[in-house]
Image (cartoon, grey):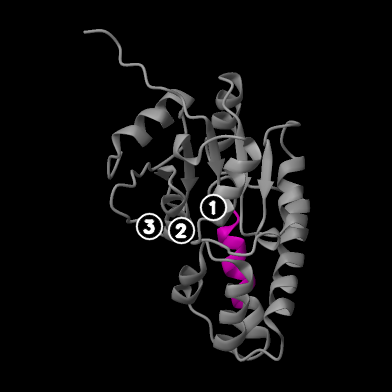
Amino acid sequence: MGAVHHTLPAAVLWDMDGTLVDTEPEWIATERALVMSHGGTWTDEDSKKLVGSALIEAGEYIRVRGGLPMTAEQVVESMVDHIIERLKESIAWRPGARELLTDLRANGVPCALVTMSYRRLADIVVSALPPDTFGAVITGDEVVNGKPHPEPYLRAAGELGVDIADCIVIEDSTTGARAGVAAGARMVAAPNVVDVDLPGVPKVTTLVGMRAVDLASIAEMGRTSV
């Protein structure tokens, strides 16, 4: 029997936090530190609820839950400032992510970064990668509706000039995966600090060793685990 050849996607649309870079633990620590500095209480469950969410929505949740004397916008700006300072020190890449980006580029598959983090934070991550790694960068402060709304992924496909149905989205959270599904993309979930459990969304335990053709195969098969 001959080898099965899988059609490569028109583009791959990447989530950032927890998928491309391992920043979720830093976001969680930052949330906790901010709330506790004002005498509030914060739990891991609180943080898990916010993974993948639009930052302004997370900021409002943190403000209310922690009883902070700040606006949601001030909460977000404080956290973004802290994460930026940590990224300037070092960037922790998710295992296998950069290698997969390299293979996609070698195979002529364009990529977009689709993140709910703000542009000034995303720019630091993008600048640490080879030029033109991403043909489009969509950030949370530049969309009307954040994830799980489909707008961010639809915008990314539009900027790349491809049909969203021919794209693969890589996400680490249920919130982000819902956005990809709602947009009409094929999905591959790579859970990090939270599980992703959506019907028809295949999961991988790691991106290590993943190639463009492997990604296409997993997305097409729609397996629930790999």
The Cα atoms of the two marked residues, 2 and 3, are separated by: 7 Å
Looking at the image, residue 224 sits to the left or right of residue 63; the answer is: left
* Residue 175 belongs to the span the image colors magenta: no
Instruction: Tell me the tag on residue 18.
Output: 1
Residue behind mark 3 = 195
Q: What type is the residue that disc 1 sits on?
A: Gly
Looking at the image, residue 69 sits to the left or right of residue 21; the answer is: right
Q: Which residues are magenta?
A: 23-32
Relative to residue 9, is residue 193 depicted above or below? below
Q: Considering depth in this image, is 89 or 45 the residue closer to the camera? A: 45
The Cα atoms of the two marked residues, 1 and 3, are separated by: 12 Å
Q: Neighbour class for label 1 at 10 Å: few (<14), some, many (≥20)?
A: many
Q: Main secondary structure of the magenta part?
A: helix
Q: Considering depth in this image, is 54 or 152 the residue closer to the camera? A: 152
Looking at the image, residue 26 sits to the left or right of residue 221; the answer is: right
Asked if the residue under mark 2 is in contact with the one under mark 1, i.e. CB atoms within 8 Å, the reply is yes
Q: What type is the residue that disc 3 sits on?
A: Asp
Q: What type is the residue that disc 2 sits on?
A: Val
